[in-house]
Structure formats: C-alpha cells, structure tokens
Image (cartoon, grey):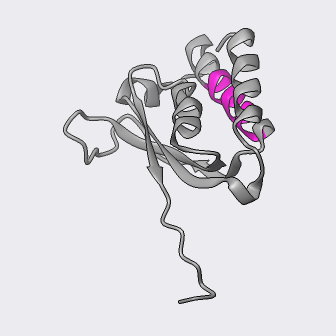
C-alpha cells in the first residue's frame, strides 16, 4: 500500500470517529483468495510484500483509534471455504466508528487483492435492561 494511501486512510479514520459515545460497533471479516494465503508462507519478495501490506494496514487501523480487537486466523491456501466463490475467512477487525459509511471506508482500504471485506454491524445488547 502506498504511503499516500495510508496517510489518507489515517486521516479518514481519525475524522470518522467523533467519540466512543457516538460510535457504532462493526466487525470487518477479511476473506482472501487461496493464492494470497499462500503468500503467508512465501519466504521471498512476494511474501514479504504480502506481510508488509497487512502490517501497514493494521498499524493504520490501530492508529485510527477505531480498532477494538481482531486477529489473523490460522489458515492456508488449502483451507476449506464456506463460500461459493472460494474465498477463505482469514481474519477480522472489531471496530467502533461513526456509521456504516465509515466502516465501509476502512474496509475498502484493506489490501485483499481479489478478496473482500464483509462489513457487519454488531448487535448491541444493553445488559443493564436485560
């Protein structure tokens, strides 16, 4: 991911989080192609580029203040997919942002290269009244 793109993402992320009280929780589910997942084990330049792009994205997400959790999943190119398109769930981020558009903007910046990021609003349950 280019430095200008990362800077734009950071500015966008910081501008869409007015405060925790007004934030809405979402989960970004990361789906990747088997070919991209194979890069996780590639010791060459392609593997390094794969990890560099995800490291940069993760650092920018963290710096935005939107991230509440997340992790990459232990999967590989031979992992089974539950999707018709063959994409494999490879990780997730839990975020708090102002609205669905802000969540989508963060999702759109992910370096999925042929994969996708599903933006799912979290169910918020008020435990004090239940």
Percent x, y of residue 32: 41, 32
Check the image and report above or below for 26 versus 5: below
Check the image and report above or below for 116 versus 74: above
Give the extent of the magenta segment. Answer: 51-62
Pick out the residue farthest to the left.
Answer: 84
Instruction: Identify the residue at image location x=76%, y=37%.
Output: 64
Q: Nearer the viewer, residue 127 or 71?
A: 127
Check the image and report above or below for 45 versus 58: above
Percent x, y of residue 60: 74, 31
Check the image and report above or below for 37 versus 96: above
Q: Count the marks.
A: 0
Instruction: Identify the residue at image location x=69%, y=48%.
Output: 67
Q: Nearer the viewer, residue 81 or 40?
A: 81
Magenta residues: mostly which secondary structure? Answer: helix
Instruction: Identify the residue at image location x=54%, y=69%.
Output: 124
Query: Would residue 59 be counted in the magenta stretch?
Result: yes
Q: Nearer the viewer, residue 29 or 15?
A: 15
Residue 68 lies in quadrant: bottom right
Instruction: Identify the residue at image location x=63%, y=49%.
Output: 95
Image quarter in which the N terminus is found:
top right
Percent x, y of residue 34: 36, 30
Percent x, y of residue 52: 68, 22
Is 106 displayed left or right of 55 in the figure? left
Is 115 displayed left or right of 48 in the figure? left
């Amino acid at each position: 991911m280019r430095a200008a793109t990362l800077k734009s993402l950071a500015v966008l992320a910081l501008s869409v989080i007015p405060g925790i009280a007004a934030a809405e929780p979402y989960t970004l589910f990361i789906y990747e192609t088997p070919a991209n997942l194979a890069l996780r084990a590639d010791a060459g330049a392609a593997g390094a580029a794969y990890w560099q792009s995800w490291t940069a994205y993760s650092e920018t997400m963290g710096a935005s203040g939107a991230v509440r959790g997340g992790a990459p999943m232990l999967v590989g190119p031979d992992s089974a997919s539950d999707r018709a398109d063959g994409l494999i769930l490879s990780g997730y981020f839990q975020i708090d942002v102002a609205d669905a558009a802000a969540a989508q903007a963060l999702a759109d910046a992910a370096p999925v290269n042929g994969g996708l990021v599903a933006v799912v609003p979290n169910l918020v349950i008020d435990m004090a009244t239940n």
